[in-house]
Amino acid sequence: MVVSQEVDAANRLRWEQGRSGHYEVYYLTFNHRASGSGFWIRYTMTAPDKGKGDAYAQIWFSYFNRANPAKNFALKQKYPIGQLKAETTPFRLQIGGNTLENGHADGAISGNGHEAQWDVSFDPSNTVHLMMPRIFVEKELADTTALVPHLDVCFEGKISVDGEALEFGGDPGCQTHLWGDEHARRWAWAHCNSYNEDPSAVFEGLSVQIKRAGIMLPPINLLFIRYMGKDYRFTELHRFLSAGGSFDVGHWKFNAALGNVKFKGEMKCRDEDMVSAGYFDPDGEPAYCNNTEVGDSKIEVYKRRNLLSSWKLVDTLTADGTAHMEFASRKREARVEKEIEEV
């Protein structure tokens, strides 16, 4: 399996032994289309601020059943930081007996009446998608740096969930890496690479609000859309004003225009399809994330002949139960009843 130097470098663990005030996350989100289920697997570590406790690692596993949300569950297991091992060139991360590589992930977790084992693989990407302006990534200017080493990949392998074995045969998903010293105050994130009308289509988006000098700033919308094999990027500084939107828990509407092409999109899910999970900043302050991997997406595509022409709807992309998304803030959302459980 050949992995580009760019992809290998993107997944390199940024944390160094003894460093405080840092958190780092690797997550995989993907679907099993035959069963209508979705998965969210996280390999994470947190090094609290000095005096706030010892560094630790965690494994998260979340299962979403679109047809029967009562079967949904999410588990997390904590490990001493000494059980976190990382290698570079090639990249390899290990937390206890759970491993992540470019193109492969395996592990197991059990507790609270549930158990899961995973051993999945995918062909690595050749390039890295940056979720924010390049200078922000290269200089680590944001509180959290986020990039996607494997944006549009197809999963093979097997997952066992509460004794049921699911075989994967080219099912859609992605793998992301992020790190920093503080989560945003509020955000929406979504990904989908399984649209009915265009197999090449991909959406990756982030709408984030941060606070500076005690003032909550307006949302920054960072969008990427691949449509009919062409990439439309709204992630650089000069494109900030080209994308907009608004969101609440379970629903995000967005829009973006580039030249004579415009997109209007929507990400949505049911309350029962989400699980609530607490993220913790290194200083101990929590953020509450509401996540699903079985949401819906619709993107309308508009075109015009020139700047003086009116927009015309030319296409609509839909995804039913294969959109990944999360909505987060500093307050727990009461209507999302199911929570991740520590084992």
Image (spheres, rainbow, N blue to C red):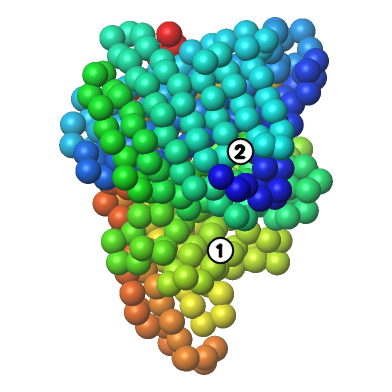
Residue 164: percent from left, percent from top: 23, 24
Amino acid at circle 2: His
Residue furthest out toward the front: 1
Q: Are the residues flagged by discs 2 and 1 in contact, CB closer than 8 Å?
A: no
Assess disc 2: are there few (<14), some (14-19) or many (≥20) residues with their C-alpha within 10 Å of its C-alpha. Answer: many
Q: Is residue 47 above or below residue 35?
A: above
Q: Which residue is mark 2?
A: 177
Residue 295 showing in the rendered view: no
Q: Residue at x 52, y 91 (%)?
A: 306
Q: Is residue 65 left or right of residue 44?
A: left
| Mark 2 → mark 1, Cα distance in angstroms | 23 Å
Residue 134: percent from left, percent from top: 73, 55
Amino acid at circle 1: Ala
Label 1, secondary structure: give it.
strand
Q: Which residue is mark 1?
A: 243
Q: Is residue 296 above or below residue 175?
A: below
Residue furthest out toward the left: 67
Q: Residue at x 78, y 18 (%)?
A: 17
